[in-house]
Amino acid sequence: MKVIEIRRHSIRGNGLHLNREGIALARRVGNDMQRAARVITSTLDRAFETAIAMGFAVDERYEILSTMGDKASCEIFWDSPYSEFTDKMIAGSALESLGGELKKLIGAIAADIPNDGRALIITHGGIIQTIAAACLPGEEFSESGGPPSYCEGIEIHYDNEKNDICGYKLIKL
């Protein structure tokens, strides 16, 4: 099984960068994580810094992982729970369009890692829930509670042979 692990960045201070607490949290979380064949972050510094503090070298950075964009942000607040993203994933919406693009990216990453491999993506609130809603349509996420907090997220599991999604696991600290 291939695993795409998608996590929110760690705690930042008043500026754009992680604060001491955020670095310490990312280090603690990183110590317990499995190694990834590929590490990808958004283009924002806090995502890149989180991966580095976790102990990973960053292979790639993607703009699409940095923001939901104005149109999708008008449809749903980034800090909404997973279930609200599923409810708002309506055909023709900006959120649905963003979800489709993110689903393609996640599928391409899964196709590019070896069987039984793992990729790590560090991104932001709103992006994680959009990926979950797009990749797992119809899933209620009733057990998820609220949105992902710092360094939390979701694992999406892909079948090695067909490269199809075969499950998921929410990551809570």
Image (cartoon, rainbow, N blue to C red):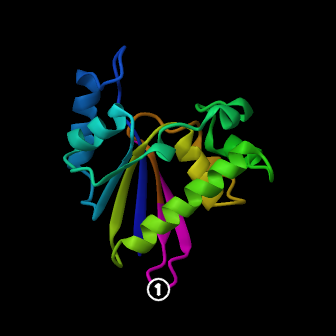
Q: Position of residue 22 (x, y in %)?
A: 29, 28
Residue at 57 percent across and 38 percent down: it is 126
Residue at far top of view: 14
Q: Which residue is mark 1?
A: 161
Residue range highlighted in magenta: 156-173
Quarter placement of the N terminus: bottom left
Q: Position of residue 169 (x, y in %)?
A: 49, 58
Residue at far front of view: 63
On whether residue 104 falls in the magenta region, the answer is no
Q: Nearer the viewer, residue 64 or 36?
A: 64
Instruction: Say whether residue 152 is left or right of residue 98.
Output: left
Mark 1 Cα-neighbour bin, 10 Å: few <14, some 14–19, many ≥20: few
Residue at 68 percent across and 37 percent down: it is 72
Quarter placement of the C terminus: top left
Q: Position of residue 92 (x, y in %)?
A: 80, 50
Q: Answer above or below: position of 125 versus 114.
A: above
Q: Answer above or below: position of 165 versus 74.
A: below
* Rendered image quadrant of residue 115: bottom left
Residue at 35 percent across and 52 percent down: it is 40
Q: Visible in this render: residue 141?
A: no
Q: Secondary structure at mark 1?
A: loop
Q: Nearer the viewer, residue 27 or 9?
A: 9
Kind of residue indicated by mark 1: Glu
Q: Visible in this render: residue 41?
A: yes
Q: Position of residue 95 (x, y in %)?
A: 69, 44
